Image (tube, rainbow, N blue to C red):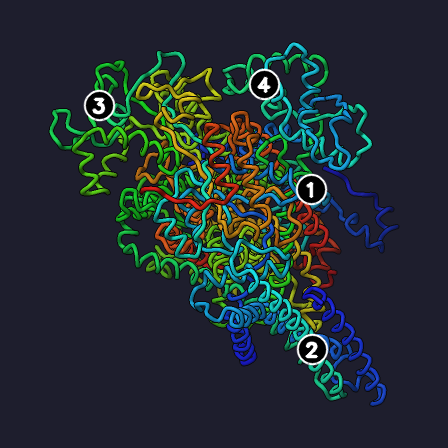
Amino acid sequence: MKTGLGVSDTLQEADNKEHIRTRIDKTLLADNQANVQNSAAQIRMTAKDVNVHYADNHAIKDVSLSIYANEVLSIIGPSGCGKSTFLRCLNRINDIIDDCKIRGEIKLDGKDIYSADMDVVELRARVGMVFQKPNPFPKSVYDNVAYGPRLHSMVSNREETDEVVYSCLRQVGLLAEVEKRIHKSGTELSGGQQQRLCIARALAVKPDVILMDEPCSALDPIATAKIEDLIDELRTQYSIVIVTHSMQQAARVSQRTAYFNLGDLVEMGDTGQIFTNPQHQLTEDYITGRFG
Amino acid sequence: MPQTPVSFWDTPKFKRGLAKRRAAEWRFKLYGLIAMLIGLASVALLFVSITLNGVGAFWQTQIKLDIFFDPAEFSEENLQAANYGKLVKNTLYSHFPEVTKRKEKRQLSRIVSVGADIMVQKMVMAEPSLIGTTKSIWLPVDDVFDMLHKIDFGRDSSKGGSGLVSENQLKWFDSLVANGLIDSRFNRTYFTAGDSREPELAGLLGALMGSFYTILVTLLISFPVGAAAACYLEEFAPRNRFTDFIEININNLAAVPSVVFGLLGLAVFINFFGLPRSVPLVGGLVLSLMTLPTIIIAGRAALHAVPPSIREGALALGASKTQTVIQEVVPLAMPGMLTGTIIGIARALGETAPLLMIGMVAFIVDIPSGPLDPSTALPVQIFLWVDSPERAFVEKTSGAILILLAFLITMNIVAVWLRQKFERRW
Amino acid sequence: MNAWILIVVVLALSSLLYYVAKRRSLTIARSVGGIHRLHSAPRYYGIVAALLFAVPALVVLGLWISIDEGIIFRLVLAEYFPELDRESQVDIDWLTSQILIFAQTGRLGNVENAELLQLAAARYQHLTSLSQTLRNASVLALGSIAGFVFVLAISEKLRARPIAEGIIRGLMVFSSLIAIFTTVGIVLSVLFEAINFFQIVPVADFLFGLEWSPQIAIREDQVGSSGLFGSIPLFVGTILIAGVAMAVAVPVGLLSAIYLAEYASARIRSFAKPTLEILAGVPTVVYGFFAALVVAPYFADIGARIGLNIAHESALAAGVVMGIMIIPFVSSLTDDVMTAVPQSIREASLACGATHSETVKRVVFPAALPGIIGALLLAVSRAIGETMIVLMAAGLAARLTANPLESVTTVTVQIVTLLVGDQEFDNPKTLAAFALGLTLFVATLLLNVTALYIVRKYSEQYE
Amino acid sequence: MIFMSSSLRVILTVLAVMLGSFSTSLQAGERDYISIVGSSTVYPFATVVAERFGTSTQYKTPIIESTGSGGGLKLFCAGIGVSHPDVTNASRRIKQSEIDRCAENGISDIVEIKVGYDGIVIAHSTSTDRFSITRRDIFLALAKHVPDPGGEAKLIPNPYQTWKDVNAELPDVAIRVLGPPPTSGTRDAFAELALEAGCKTFDWIKAIRKSDKSQYKSICHAVREDGVWVEAGENDNLIVQKLNADPTSLGVFGFSFLDQNSDLVQGSIVDGVAPEFENIADGSYKISRALYIYVKTAHVDLIPGIKEFIAEFTNDRAWGEDGYLVDKGMIPMSDMERSEFKTAAMDLTTVQLASE
């Protein structure tokens, strides 16, 4: 655990905007850490001292946090604060970006996901992801959902596939809407349906953790509401990490909230506490709209 | 650690499948790598084989003869009438006093190129004061001996050329080499002469000039017309069936086989308009029709890349549409248009088939001095030389290819440089 | 004053007129109270004046040059050779050549009527110089009238800019129409001769005949000409060679494009991609040389060693080299369509736990497939239209075979061999080349249009 | 669009006017170089002469296109004037029909110059005993259909597999002949001089000639296609190499290649005559043909240098026994023939076909 800068320094440079981030008091996070250690049984993933660099850009700085089973953790923060980057580290989807360098430790069920004996295919199967823009494959609705199970040979015949596909579609509440055109292209659905299709596709792989990267930013309010309801339902089976721009959404769906700013994890805690009684000035500024 | 139930991911079935999938991944990557290496190997093979064959063309085996310009051989008034061949041959014979028989002498004299006498003649005509003096002159040897000296071609039967050089000739030639009278020297003829049936006298200048005039005509026609058409189609043309048709038509023309353009040139320019055969003017006309679509397409892309904000800005200031395009948009698109033009012209420079159709494939020795003189072009010269039976032409052909490729690569580098230097990201 | 000097004079005068008109507009502007009172900027008055001078002058000059000689010869011949048969192009050619050469060089061919010819040549010379004087005068006069009338007409109300823009736009429209003229020219020139051909050889015989032997048919004393213009062997040969080429180019081009786009590091890509693209810039005559002198002997040699009889001019050698030529074509088009597949669906696949190759095989490739098919059709069109490689490395004997080790001939090879050096248009041999050209044009047209349609449709998919 | 269509109409009108008038002009232009077309067999010789002529005189070097003998004569006879060639090369003699065609187009005077000979040899590797065959043997071995060996006057598909089958005196080796493709002039001449000559030895086939000439041709000129005759492409060097590799094969090519590769291959004796320089030159070796050039008398003086070009071609340093054309593989004529044709050439004597 790194210690923050001395208080005197902090005071001296209090109004120096350059150094705003240095005022982050890492001790505020200690509770959280302690909390994590106490409830070890429920922990799915832990991140410790994670640093991410894109070429010259230090995108994530010494971030540590944990993800519990059956909770929704939302990550909020201004644009460019590194929340998506952090999310994308959790299933190593950032690996495909050439100059992305990651230091630190991220564990899934106690196993370091960046260690040599961790298979990235297995990791991604266990940590599913839903993206900002609905991105169904240019295949039929059915094939979209069956994609993962077929890849991993989780299904061996048509009946099993049907079962997985239908149950996943039902789970996201899409079955009734698309049953008639289940063999038509998934790209022909409406935006909200597409996004639910993408969630169904992620569920079909039976992941432990689902990462959602601003899943509703491209959707209208009605579709958003449906997805939010769905997220709440899914909590009973999965751990969900959701990155969102919308504080209302974070307040609605998540149990805990983490606030990121310029690559730092500024504050983390119960959603209610973060929104009603933020401990940190930066968090308060952001939540009250004084940021920037 | 949490006692999660054994999930699918921990089952041996999944682990086995995973291993297989890893292997498939590895294989797929390998196939890709192999394919890329095959592609690269083809480039390497093409260039290495042509370079190895071709560098020799820039050197010519020559023989040093100390020729005495005996005043008795020359008459005052007519330098042209003197027997220069005799001068050359006698000098050669003087190195081999033992050769006396007529047949042997004839064999000996074949070591020197048949064009040597004309070279000596030109030298004397240019400098009559040589008469009465002795001068060391390097003269080209016959192509067979050139090959013999360069690649040992014809020395033994395994190389396939035996029978071209007799035992005696071999002996004489080797002794000339031993005496230091034979040397490989820079082949100036190659760059200053026109075509010839004798490989050692053949040069590229005629073909180069032919290509120059052809490309000049192509450029003068295709660039202004192409740029104007691109401007019209991209900036002014209304979107309707007719302009759609023009667009489809241009895209299609870009993919029409070049030989069909040759047919067009033959039927229209030569048979209908009655323009002469074999001249760069017709070649240039045909090639500019062929290049036009490329230039139009590139020009349109360049114009398209100029953001609408520039146009809107200019229009908002009260400029007319034409003013906006000509003064604001075209200058910004010009680097892109020029790049497209260079690429199109480079393609035209290497084009052969249409030129065959319009008769630029004749045996032409004289260097053309204008776009209405009959001539060949560089790629056609390559085609003609490939068909020649003399072994030495393989080398000349490869040399010509090297020069052609050098031009093309230079043009492409200029195009890339232009693009990088002036390309703007909007 | 010859035509070139006249052109220079016209250009010089028109730039002079530019300044005159501009100056005049400025003077007028001063008198009416400033440049802003003018309808258009002063340079537009200059541009219009210059264009009005140059365009009509050059058009008249062009017309004059293209018709004056014909008229002069007609006059001269009518005067000195009134008994000449007007229909006999041969005699006219002969006399005009004689007159022209005598007038220009004073040489006279081996003829009987030398004196008459000399008189005619003198007359020709006289008329030519007269015509030149007239031409120069009328060109300059016409240009001047148009230009100077405009200069005189300049006033602050004159709408110079729209006129200038109209002229410029007219020139642009003319430029874009040249593409149409080209297509029309191709179709007409090829179609016209092809129709002549089909009057001699029935279309069905041409399209479905199994034997092609135009060389023999050229001489009336050789084996008869009926039924020897069957183009099937040529098309089979063309398809065979194109097939070999595609068999080389498709796997190598596709896989290397995939490797470069998906796997190769930035450094390898920055080296390998331009290197492969060099292949696209190499002239086809170089490939022909490579095929004929390097690849074909090598294959024949290998064949001899393993007991296979591989013809020296086998379809295999020509096809393989043509395949190499097409590799960059396939790979760069594939690269384009594959990179057009959005990154987001790649990520979606990876996030489902797919390996990289599974993503490529199951998502990216199927998504890009229509575009790739379009690209391959364009490549096929290229392969069947390619001339030099097959001309230099494939054979001439039209053989109906599917064995790539034998020598076959192609449509393009036949077009060239039938036409090179022979400009007579009245026998089926030369006309056949145009019939072949027509079929080639139609075939590639269909392929191109289909391919362009598919590619266009595809590129709209992700917009 | 209104603007488009009006300007379009103007442009089209202008274009139509231009097209209409253009074709009558530009045809004639001065030409100060000799234009030569014709046989690809004579091409290498004509180009050498042209080059010599160009470098050693003040005239421009003639321009030579290889169009084949028939194509060349056709162009040649198309008319007089600068747009038509002055000289054509031929690897056969001009035919009466061609002379007539020339005359129709106003070309009444043509000078014929025979420049030399070209022999076609049937060669094999030096490592075997010299072959001696007749033209009848050649026909029987290579024709697509041969007369029934039973003696009846009918044709059967060629059954012979070894030379011994053809003629009991010949060795018992498989027939395998490498030769040029049908497009080659050598193949034409070979068919005419060897196959047809052998074919004619069957009287009943010879009789067909009178009744049905084209059937006669197809019998005598058709070469078998069952793999015995191997088309080796136009590359004669390659044939030489293959013969060296397979001593039982025979190869058909021009004499010049035999001459240049005499250490590797030898020519078969045909009808008792060996393909040697002297035998071809005096005509006793039968598979040989004469090479010609034809000159348009009307163009002499019109185009500069034609006379001088003929003089160069007919100079002994060119076509003589030690001339540079011999170096390129041509077989020279006898002194007498040379002087005869030289005189005819210099006097521009018009060709007369005695009988055809």
| Residue with the mark numbered 3 | D160
Query: x and y percent of residue D151 in the render?
Result: 12, 26
The quarter of the rendered structure image containing the N terminus of chain A is: top right
Q: Which residue has dot 4 on it?
A: B107
The disc label shown at residue A53, or none: 1
Disc 3 marks a residue whose amino acid type is Tyr
Q: Quadrant of residue B135?
A: top right
Residue B314 as seen in the image, left or right of residue B16: right
Name the chain letter of the residue that bears numbered label 3: D
Amino acid bearing label 2 = Gly
Residue type at tag 1: His
Mark 3 or 4: the one toward you: 4
Q: Amino acid at mark 4?
A: Gln
Helix, strand or loop at disc 1?
strand
Relative depth, front residue between A60 and B66: B66
> Secondary structure under badge 2?
helix
Nearest to the eye among marks 2 and 1: give it.
Answer: 2
Distance of mark 2 from mark 3, alpha carbons?
A: 84 Å
Q: Which mark is residue A255?
A: none
Distance, label 1 to label 3, CA atoms, is 83 Å
Residue under mark 2: which chain is it in? C
In space, the residues marked 4 and 2 are separated at their CA atoms by 71 Å
Q: CA distance from mark 4 to mark 1?
A: 79 Å
Classify mark 3: residues with Cα within 10 Å, few (<14), some (14-19) or many (20+): some
- Against D272, residue B44 (above or below) is below
For mark 2, what is the residue? C143
Discs 1 and 3 carry the same chain letter: no
Which of A70/D124 is in front? D124
Are both tags, 2 and 3, on one chain? no
- The answer to the question of whether label 2 and label 3 lie on touching residues, with beta carbons closer than 8 A, is no
Nearest to the eye among marks 1 and 3: give it: 3
Figure quadrant of the C terminus of chain A: bottom right
